[in-house]
Image: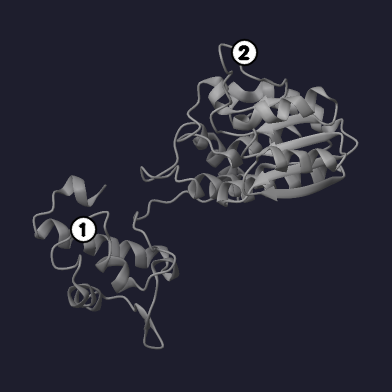
Amino acid sequence: MSDPVPAMADRASACAERVLAADSVVLASHIDADGLTSGAIAATALERAGIPFETTFEKQLDAAAIDRIAATDHEVALFTDFGSGQLDEIVPHHRAGEFDAVVADHHQPATGEDGEEPPEIEHHLNPLLFGIDGAAELSGAGATYVLARAMERDGVDNRDLAALAVVGAVGDMQDTDGGLRGANEGVVAEGVDAGVIEEVTDISLYGRQTRPLPKLLEYASELRIPGISGDEQGSIRFLSELDVDLKVDGDWRRWVDLSFEERQTVASALMRHAISRGVPRSASTA
């Protein structure tokens, strides 16, 4: 089995062994895009491993939430997309034997107070502990994916869960530079190999999934193009002159509705338009 993030492989294996040895698990995750995908990855891995589990989602992992998790009376508590910053609250329950804690997170770990050693547990999987930027290079879903890969046994292949890890990374704004980088690249590569992710070059404009094409170009803040940006009629005029059917039953299509060839046609025309109006080539291809 290959490791999507080699630096985290040994810790991931130790965490996986603890989870796989559990009679039952309570899975706790955060309520946001990264947390929901983290929970989905972990739940799928647990189900495939045949481990009974209960799932709970928390908006905030405070002392009351951890008390509720402890009260579920499961052998292992698996925290995804949170837990690192709450180890000071988790560790007392862990040491009291209320649960064995396993954390797959990417947030800054809790620090000790008044010169004390920071709280820590044996099964703590966080890219920050291995010199990997948890804000930009691996999300909570990515850390949970690394754990899920380490949990594979008896022919199970969890590489299809890479698609969820990418959704989590994008949901946590780790694609702000136009793509995923660092440890995320290993996750993407495994998703491509598994056939659940396709790598393509595309425009990076807000609203690709939702806005009609004229509005997509008119309101694009990533790059100002004279005659199109902030100009409703200019945007419509530009699109109307292209040799592409950009409407369905009289309604403008969205970028996501276009085929690869249609996207190439629009993007190429947009680049020519921008350059002809003085936008530097480096800016128009960013």
- At a point 17% along the width and 74% down the height, the residue shown is 234
- Residue carrying label 2: 117
- At a point 83% along the width and 33% down the height, the residue shown is 20
Judge by depth and name the residue closer to the eye, 207 or 77: 77
Q: Secondary structure at mark 1?
A: helix
Q: Earlier in the sequence, mark 2 or mark 1?
A: 2
Residue type at mark 2: give it.
Glu
Judge by depth and name the residue closer to the eye, 49 or 37: 37
Residue 155 visible in the picture: no
Left or right: 99 in relation to 23: left
Q: Is residue 79 above or below residue 280?
A: above
Residue type at mark 1: give it.
Met
Q: Secondary structure at mark 2?
A: loop
Judge by depth and name the residue closer to the eye, 261 or 124: 124
- At a point 14% along the width and 68% down the height, the residue shown is 227
Residue furthest bottom in the image: 249
Residue 129 sits in quarter: top right
Residue 28, percent across and down?
72, 43
- Residue carrying label 1: 271
Mark 2 and 1 residues: CB-CB less than 8 Å, in contact? Answer: no
Residue 69, percent across and down?
78, 41
- The N terminus: image quadrant: top right
